[in-house]
Amino acid sequence: MVPQDKVEQLRQSIQAQKEAEALRQEAQGSGLSPGLADQYQKKIADLEQSLEQTEALIEELRSKAAQSHDDFLRKHAELENFRKRVEREKAFMLER
């Protein structure tokens, strides 16, 4: 299960990415004063950094999910093997 704080962080990052794109388009579409353009560029850089962090988090969560799935499959196989072994041993004991 993905921790709720990680989900919230992903949501915030997605929102930040949308804001960065909107700011980028606004900055390109109008003749901004240099001070305001600098503010937009700083905000865009901050949002892009947040996006990079979120992408790293997504990759980490994907890796954990894959590992959990692999662990589940292994445990399931172990349980099936145990069940079959118990059935064989039971049948053997009943034949005696």
Image: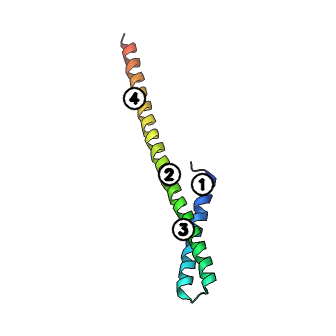
Quarter of the image where one finds residue 39 = bottom right
Looking at the image, can residue 20 be seen? yes
Amino acid type for the residue under numbered disc 4: Asn
Distance of mark 1 from mark 2, alpha carbons? 11 Å
Q: Is residue 92 above or below residue 6?
A: above
Residue placed at 61% from the left, 59% from the top? 9
Quickly name the residue at label 4.
Answer: 81
Earlier in the chain: of badge 3 and badge 2, it is: 3
Quickly name the residue at label 2.
Answer: 60
Instruction: Tell me the crowding category of disc 1: few under 14, some 14 to 19, or many 20 or more residues within 10 angstroms, Cα based.
Output: some
- Kindly state the secondary structure of the residue where label 1 is placed: helix
Quarter of the image where one finds residue 48 = bottom right
Q: Nearer the viewer, mark 3 or mark 4?
A: 3
Amino acid type for the residue under numbered disc 1: Lys
Q: Position of residue 22 (x, y in %)?
A: 56, 78
Earlier in the chain: of badge 1 and badge 2, it is: 1
Quickly name the residue at label 3.
Answer: 48
Distance of mark 3 from mark 4, alpha carbons? 49 Å
Q: Nearer the viewer, residue 84 or 16?
A: 16
Earlier in the chain: of badge 1 and badge 3, it is: 1
Distance of mark 3 from mark 2, alpha carbons? 18 Å
Disc 3 + disc 4, Cβ < 8 Å:
no
Going by the picture, which residue comes out furthest to the top?
Answer: 96
Residue placed at 59% from the left, 57% from the top? 7
Earlier in the chain: of badge 1 and badge 4, it is: 1
Quickly name the residue at label 1.
Answer: 6
Amino acid type for the residue under numbered disc 3: Glu
Q: Position of residue 38 (x, y in %)?
A: 60, 78
Residue placed at 59% from the left, 73% from the top? 42
Q: Is residue 65 above or below residue 72?
A: below
